[in-house]
Amino acid sequence: MKVSAWLCATLLLLASSSALAETTLRIGIQDDPDVLDPHRSRTYSGRLVYTALCDKLVDVSPQLELVPQLATAWQWGDDNRSLTLHLRPGVTFHDGEAFDAAAVKFNLDRARSLPDSLRKSELASVDTVEVVDPQTVRIHLKQPDATLLAQLSDRAGMMLAPKASTGDVGSKPVCSGPYRFVQRVQQDRIVLERFPQYWNASAYHFDRLIFLPIPDTSVRLANLRSGDLDIVERVAPTDVKGLQGQAGFTLYNTPGLGYMQLMVNMANGDRAKNPFAGDKRVRQAFDLALDREALNQVVFEGLYAPSVQPFPQSSPYYDKAFAVPARDVARSQALLKAAGVALPVKVELKIANNPIAQQVGQLIQAMAAEAGFEVNLVATEYATLLAEQHAGNFQLGLSAWSGRPDPDGNVHQFVTCKGNQNDGHYCNAALDQLLDQARTTNDQAQRQTLYAQALTLLREELPVFYLYFDPRIIATRADLKGFIPNPDGLIRLAGVTRGQ
Amino acid sequence: MNALTLPHPATLRPARSPFWRKFSANRGALLGAALILTFALAALLAPWLAPFDPLKTSFLAVRKAPSALNWLGTDELGRDLLSRLLWGARSSLLAGVVSVAIALLVGVPLGLVAGYFGGWLDALISRLVEALLSCPFLVLAIALGAFLGPSLGNAMIAIGLSAMPVFARLTRGQVLAIRHEDYLEGARAIGLPDRWILWRYVLPNILSPLVVQATLTIAAAILAEASLSFLGLGQQPPMPSWGSILNTAKNFMEQAPWMSIAPGVCIYLTVLGFNLLGDGLRDALDPRHQ
Amino acid sequence: MLRLFLRGLLSALPTLLLVSLFVFTLQQLLPGDPVLAMAGEERDPQVLEFLREKYRLNDPVPVQYLHWMGGVLQGDLGISLRTDQPVTALIAEKLPVTLELSLLAIVIALLIGIPTGIVAAVRRGTAVDYGANLVALSGISIPHFWLGILLILLFAVKLQWLPASGFVPFHEDPLRNLRTLVLPAFVLGAGLSGTLMRHTRAAMLEVLRADYVRTARAKGLRERVVILRHALRNALMPIVTLTTLLFGELLGGAVLTEQVFSIPGFGKMIVDAVFNRDYAVVQGVVLCVAVGFVLLNLLADLLYRLINPRLRQAA
């Protein structure tokens, strides 16, 4: 008697759970995003969720061009001191509010005035936002800013619904993207559901999206293999070969925008009194001792892009004059001799205590040793590492940058005198001038010339050693068709279907 | 009568031979001792036993499967895994022993003081110990490890301090049990200083359960060090430790499973050895199991 | 009984106070700036300063402690620095997960440990006894994270019988929920079963020597009846108290298993919070775990007093 009752109950449960099978897409991401408020958000994982949740004014194409999203056309005016955006008609927010110029003004004002808004430095050039008419908005700038449109393609340009966003946005963000917010369990899942009134709703074929943060790359991949995930981002390069051999999965490997760099403590506190900061020949010798290609082969299976400049190869600002030079230990030793430093040159390299950083650090240690450098590796926990670098308690620091589509975003804040991320406190007035000028002109040719000059300076002075660019490797189940990868690594689901 | 003619407290313990008899009859204990001896020898003789330099990287031999050249294969930077495991035995065993030494050095005096003197001292120490015991052991070790900074030495301190409460409580309990024994009353009556009594009379009589607990805690400490290394807080590269090898190995589970299996087996066998030994010691020292 | 419980609770209060003080101090001592850690890549100095003010991180440490304790006494455990969520909400989210995982682990441990312990006691001294002891000690000796990784490799990747990681709440999909918890519960349960098996064996041995067992045998009852009906019932009693204590330890102790299997429970939350310097979360959760531990200890104590007179009665 009891058994059959249990059996009935189980069958009913199973039946009900399969009847409710609306199409769901499960996406495995590397970390749990932080607060889901585009103006206060700071993690890359957050951007992955925003791609589905919040539309922005412009988007970036796989060719790194700016394309319309909520703004259909734009013009620069007044000596590039004003940007007029024509907005897409017929767009509504998830709560039914209409999207118009007033909403754009609300958002840009909020992004600039909220006390803990992290978009302030991105919109620093904005003076006022003017509502011309419901479909047109004009942004007046304090000075010309070539990076503005690129900033509007990220969180600074994301549009929150004005009436719903007066209080705590993070717990229930209301945007206008193809999916709307349903639920979030910290460090477990973020659930979004299809927004039927989206202006391009027909391009989106899944009813529900579930983002699952799984920090361990092999476990994330195991979930893809076992069918519990449909898409997985940031696949480890060492897993690629295994996955390529298997049927049932599609791999997308796109060169990315983010890179890894070694920063030298040039002038931040006492520890800047090291042989590296003192003589650029020592830095040049160190650069020549590194075999970036070998690093790529050993740690990343040859899938990463070694580099000596902060611009990816896909960028129009990539300078072919600065290709990765071959390793030259002899010249390195000669430079050290000319610099007259005592051998071996002792230097401390601070790295984060994750396996990738450890491998890279150990390889650098081994390679540099052959030229006469004694690198002491100090693995530090991430939170401590940030504080130590900020405080100047380092000599060499290995740090990653997730990358931005505009070249300024990849270089300005790291090497200019007052740059927010310039932990080494490198200060060169000529470099500052070049980089500041490059942000104010919209002419690509002019910018290319300026960045080329900046690169020449950087390659000569070497306050930073650029090592490699990370690719964005995304793996999906083979039955998902229509996915177009993008160098920024974000998952855009327009046109993605589950075919047979 | 004076202190010199009081019966020595050691003679009140059962004679030695039943211990050895029971110990050697216990197959589990012998197996445990054998396992520990094997790994201890491996650790001691690592410089001579290791076929390769554990720190020598080789870009051409990255993640090679076990072969005639590398009996256990190579790791992600081309280093010989067998050599790294042998040298790693040093870190792991050291971590186990030093952590417990720290725990004993801090915990036993606390327990002695609390149990012997009683009163407000006991109340204070007991509360402190209870508070520490209410925090999950591993969480405590992780927090201390993060505070001190990632390194093997700091991991040992962190684990030692986290394991200290157990010894404090055990010691206190043992002291309470014998506090009113005749020989102690006698010693106090003739005016022997407390320090003398604690050192010559109390401590020798509570050694057995402490030894057993220490052996078992070494096992837990080795596991804890592996756990901390797994989280990135223990032994830092390039020096090897079993836990940190596993930490890197988990990223190559499918391409190089040998990297995950060997260090795990080493940890398992060593910890098992200490658990078996501790068990055997407990059985052999227990007066009830005659 | 109630008076005992209340008295126990009262005497536990100073301990809990010490725990709170200790955890708070430890957090303050951790190097690294939590605001900087939170900020990650976006480093606007003005915003950083604003956040430090907002979370009172510039206040002197004793002031911060008093402010936090004041909140605790009113039921407010602070705000997670990372996501702005109240810590109490986080605990409410994760507690059912940890409870369910712990419960399943204990059930598995009981199902494996008790029968094995009985058999080992009955067949004391034989190969079965030694074998069982070896298996039990193995369970205690295997590193959880290693066992977890191996099981994922076998059951999730090779055989594809079970999901590799993740968690589905029970009310959402009970079957899936159980499937996600099987492997981690097994890993935890395997370790506990060793302890339970050994204690069951010890308790059974104790009981099997008692007079009433001899009487039962003398009466001519079958051995199986003697063991299961008479001996076991009395041997189980200390096991009950042990189980309660083990449950308390599981509350915060499944750190690595939760990490490997991505189970959003307390252990994972604490570790992530320590590494992110999310002070409020660490303090709040450790305090919660300590309270749970203290309560369970009290419960175990009371249970022991409850069943003791019955033991005396039976003999």
Image (cartoon, coloured by chain):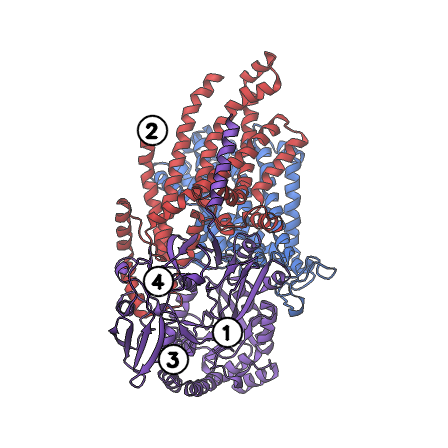
Chain colours: A purple, B blue, C red
Q: In this view, does B82 lie to the left or right of C274?
A: right
The mark closer to the camera, 4 or 2, is 4
**Residue at the limit of the structure toward the top, as seen here:** C219
Front one among A186 and A379: A186
Q: What residue type is labelled 3?
A: Thr
Q: Neighbour class for label 1 at 10 Å: few (<14), some, many (≥20)?
A: some
Indicate which disc, 3 or 1, sits on the residue closer to the N terminus.
1
Q: In which quarter of the image is residue A61?
A: bottom left
Mark 3–mark 4 Cα distance, whole angstroms, equals: 37 Å
Residue at image mark 4: A176
Q: Which chain carries label 3?
A: A
Residue at image mark 3: A416
Mark 2–mark 3 Cα distance, whole angstroms, equals: 68 Å
Q: Is mark 2 on a helix, strand or loop?
A: helix
Indicate which disc, 3 or 4, sits on the residue closer to the N terminus.
4
In the rendered image, the vertical position of residue C4 relative to residue C253, given as above or below? above
**Residue at the limit of the structure toward the right, as seen here:** B68
The mark closer to the camera, 2 or 1, is 2
Mark 1–mark 4 Cα distance, whole angstroms, equals: 51 Å
